[in-house]
Image (cartoon, helix red, strand yellow):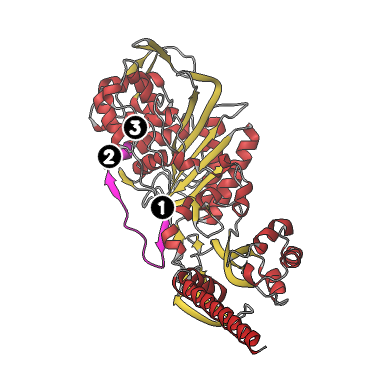
Amino acid sequence: MSRLVNRRIRLFLALLTVGFAGLFVRAAWLQGIKAQSLSRLGQTQHRESVTLPASRGTIFDRMGVRLALGEQATTVYADPMQIKQPRRVATEVGRVLGVDPDTLYPKLADRSRGFVYVARQADATRAAQLAREKIAGLGFLPEERRSYPQHSVAAQVLGYVGVDNNGLAGLEFELDRELAGKAGHQTLVKDPAGRVINVVDDRPEVQGRDVTLTLDHTIQANAEEVLRATVRKWSAKSATAIVLDPRTGAILAMAVEPGYDANRYPLAPRELQRNRAVTDTYEPGSTFKVVTVAAALSERLVSPSTAFTLPYTIQVADRVIHDAEPRGTVRYSVAQILAHSSNIGAITLAELLGKDRLSSWISRFGFGHETGVDFPGESPGIVLPAGQWSGSTIGNVPIGQGIAVTPVQMAAAYAAVANRGVWSRPHLVDQIGGRGRPSLHRRRILSRAVAASLMTMLKDVVAEGTGMYAAIPGYQVAGKTGTAQKPDSHGGYATNQYVASFVGAVPASRPRLVVLVTVDEPHGAIWGGVVAAPAFQQIASFDLGYLEIPPDAPTG
């Protein structure tokens, strides 16, 4: 009997020894081999890293009106390891926040993850309602959602931000570094039940800087309204307008129609989101003749009164070019060539210049180069260097064919003429973070005398030439019409597809505004003097009254 008891005791001791040995091996394995991974698991169970997004800076117009700002929102997140009933929680979150419970459930049920987003930038009121239910495993972070109070006003200029408040287009993208600030970092320490017991601020957030633009939301909204009416009237594909101060290059309006509501940018077609005033090119047609005339005057080959006998057609290499309207042989001065928009006259001046000098003046006016406007995606235009000109190019380029420009390039060129020959870089940003406006970039491209002669000629265009519909009672207007056939994909020109344009300065005696209007593919009429000049007149008339600019040609 005692022998049996001893055997049982020895067996028990052996089993106990084996058990302790197993526990020792298990402890050694956990502490040695699995220590690092288990430590990480413990950290995720009781410590949680959270990014604290910085508030994005507000974008103001020049009058202090808010064009883009952050609205209060709440981001809801979850720790699936703390969610006890993922199906019930998903259903409740879906009821309060309006998210799809079936999409949310797999995320909450995945206990291998310590952090998942439930809803980004949710409505703050609804998120607060959910928070009051005190569901273990759910967390709430204050965040902001970008809002555009003016809706469609300047939408293509402002652009938009993504769900992470990063600029994705327009000025939101161009100025993202200044607007975004720097995100902070915070560590939440939780108890086993998921309750926060301590908050460690590792790095505070740095708020983004505010930006003030040169845009005036009233001038911008009016320009867009005029363009909408113009597009409707002429069943046009699109229209663009720029209003700028020729003295400084400050852009008061940069409008593109059709537009879209910036608050609903994901629903807007990409075609509508593009700022065509900066990114798109067009053949300018007769508005480009001011460059040809300016070059001939500057090279002292002619004066405004120099006269030429001009037939209706002219042969240039393998091309026969004619004026827009049938006529007999005429004798026009240089001033009349511009006033009547004579193709034959412009080509005659270009042949006096020669391709090298004309090409040099095109470059001097800024065509073929980016203006440097503070907006992403600017096109330099399409300008052939003189070495690549064919025999007929001297007959195309002087009249604005075979060359492509952007609206902002053309507006800046006319602004230089209006500003006594000094070109100023066009710009949209006036101040960043309350600091003074950026330094202005200026260069003289014409003498004062030549600029004054051009302004006199451009006044004649409106007074007695092709731009009569641009006239504004009480003001002298200097400007030029343009009608350009659009190139096709085969190297020729499309039939019945034109760009009608007008660009001018007012008051002409002391210009305060340069306004450009282009209308793409109008129907019913194609001429710049008929389609675009009236839009110029409406935009400029409103702006003169709004800015209280006194008349320079009072009527009795």
Reading the image, the residue beneath label 3 is 291
The answer to which image quadrant residue 352 occupies is top left
Task: Examine the rendering and report whether any part of residue 163 can be seen.
Answer: yes
Q: Amino acid at mark 3?
A: Val
The number of callouts visible is: 3
Residue positioned 41% across, 30% down in the render = 404
Q: Which residue is mark 1?
A: 250
**Considering the image in quadrants, where does the N terminus appear?**
bottom right
For the point 51% across and 42% down, the residue is 241
**Is 108 located above or below residue 46 in the figure?**
above
Residue 131, given in percent of the width and then of the height, sits at 68, 75
Tag 1's secondary structure? loop
Going by the image, does 247 lie left or right of 298?
Answer: right
The numbered mark at residue 108 is none
- List the residue tagged with mark 2: 446
Looking at the image, residue 59 lies above or below residue 487: below
Q: Earlier in the sequence, mark 1 or mark 2?
A: 1
Which range of residues does the magenta coloring cover?
Answer: 427-453
Q: In the rendering, at what x and y percent does residue 7 appear?
A: 61, 83
